[in-house]
Image: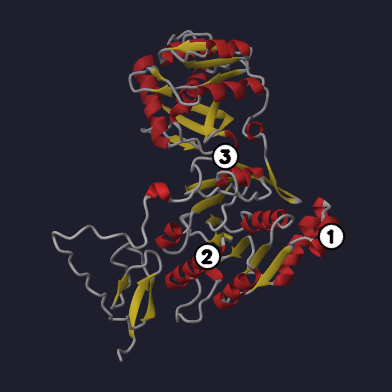
Amino acid sequence: MARATSLYVCQSCGAQTRQFFGRCSSCGSWNTLVEQTATPTDNRRRRPVAAAPEAAMPAAPRRSEPIAAVGDRPLQRLGSGYGELDRVLGGGLVPGSLVLLGGDPGIGKSTLLLQSAQAMAARHSVLYVSAEESAQQVKLRWRRLAEEQGELAPVAEQQAGGPGLQLLAETDLELVLQELEALRPAVAVIDSIQALHDGELGSAPGSVAQVRECAAALARIAKRQDTALLLVGHVTKEGMLAGPKVLEHLVDAVLTFEGDRFASHRLLRAVKNRFGATHELGVFEMRGQGLAQVLNPSELFLGSDEPSAGTATIVACEGTRPLVVELQALVSTTSYSSPRRTATGIGTNRLHQILAVLEKHLGLPLSRFDCYLAVAGGLEVEEPAADLGVAAAVVASYRDLTLPPGTVLIGELGLGGQLRPVAQLEQRLQESARLGFRRAVVPKGSGLGRLAAGLDLQLLEAGGVAEALVAALGVNPADDRA
């Protein structure tokens, strides 16, 4: 009988080696190799498949079938109790799916899942497995949330006659699997996957082997009994999900819960989703009674009603949701040989490109000025449709001008100074009109004049950045007398 050998496994990438090194040779991480015992493998060989004679008839399939003969199965989704969470998931939880939720410590992952589990418990059986907190700690948070929402009486009645919410405070994987087999819930929450421990493995909880084996065991039982599984995952200092990459490949959806610790709102995004789009955005706000969904996030990212120099308004699209966002720019004389460029919420390289276009085609000496750009509300805007708004905010701050109130700017800026069309322009104009904006500067050739007239929105079309800025500011920014 072969004896067990020792292997050193990297906790970052999962690479294996038989010798210990201070640095992993695969990913380059330091002090991530942990010794583990390798179990002897089964050396049985597969039976050889006999080759069919050339003149023989084609063999009949044993288990496969034509794809057209596969029966259709309707996709029944389970509502999570939060419209914002359902939007990011693609319409709700799919039975038998695995969803991995990651985020910084204290961002509200456990609060979100506990509130969602309580809402789903009114219609389905839900099991909440707490591997990091005791049952008393979870109940204290549950009672605080329920008392502030005034839901203790309905919860007591629901637990007496409805499916209810079951709580299990356990770190042993075998006991968690036994509870899932016995209860067979429609939804199960594991908080968190890094805290579970498989007794058959010699490594510590949270290691690559533990996370991989625990997630695989939970995935098998969830697929077998059609249980929607929600896993909470830790993140590293770089903001990436901790554990092996195979964990992200194993699950059906990967969600990230992010937000600024100095702000009250939280953003929920989908990095991977096998049952929906990956560019949807859910917005929540942390309040005293827990997390509350923000149904109108445009008001959250808009600044004050008083216009100021260097401020422009754009309409960014996160998936199918248009968001009206305020941009703020500050241009000041530099005190150094090379000017500073700082951008918050927009890529710095994108800002450099827009400044170069403005200096080339408008003749503005921006290379001698410091430029600071910020997106109000802490939102990250990655799409190029914000280029025209960035250019208008920079020029307005440089010339000390104020954009007329009620004006939005939508357009992508090319290197030749031309304006390029953007996607979902109709939804952007409708959101602008709903919030009371009356002027919109867009690229030429949109063909939405009739729609803008019906929305009582003045549509100003421009072919280049100079023409667009003249229409937005009312003066020629290239004129020294502006």
Is residue 334 left or right of 144 when viewed as pictured?
left
From the image, state whether disc 2 or disc 3 is nearer to you. Answer: 2
Whichever of callouts 1 and 3 sits on the residue coming sooner in the sequence is 1
| Residue beneath disc 3 | 378
Q: Is residue 317 left or right of residue 365?
A: right
Q: Which amino acid does the dot numbered 3 rest on?
A: Gly
What residue is at 37 percent from the left and 64 percent from the top? 13
Q: Quarter-wise, where is residue 337 in the image?
A: top left
Q: CA distance from mark 1 to mark 3?
A: 41 Å
Query: In this rendering, is residue 457 above or below 57?
Result: above
**Lower sequence index among marks 2 and 3:** 2
Tag 1: Cα neighbours inside 10 Å, few (<14), some, or many (≥20)?
Answer: few
| Quarter-of-image position of residue 310 | top right
Q: Secondary structure at mark 1?
A: helix
Give the amino acid at mark 1.
Answer: Glu
Circles 1 and 2: CB distance less than 8 Å? no
Q: Position of residue 9 (x, y in %)?
A: 36, 73
Q: Is residue 307 above or below residue 336?
A: above
Residue on which disc 2 sits: 224
Amino acid marked by disc 2: Arg
Q: Secondary structure at mark 2?
A: helix
For mark 1, what is the residue?
Answer: 157
Residue ranking furthest to the bottom: 1
**Most foreground residue, 315 or 276:** 276
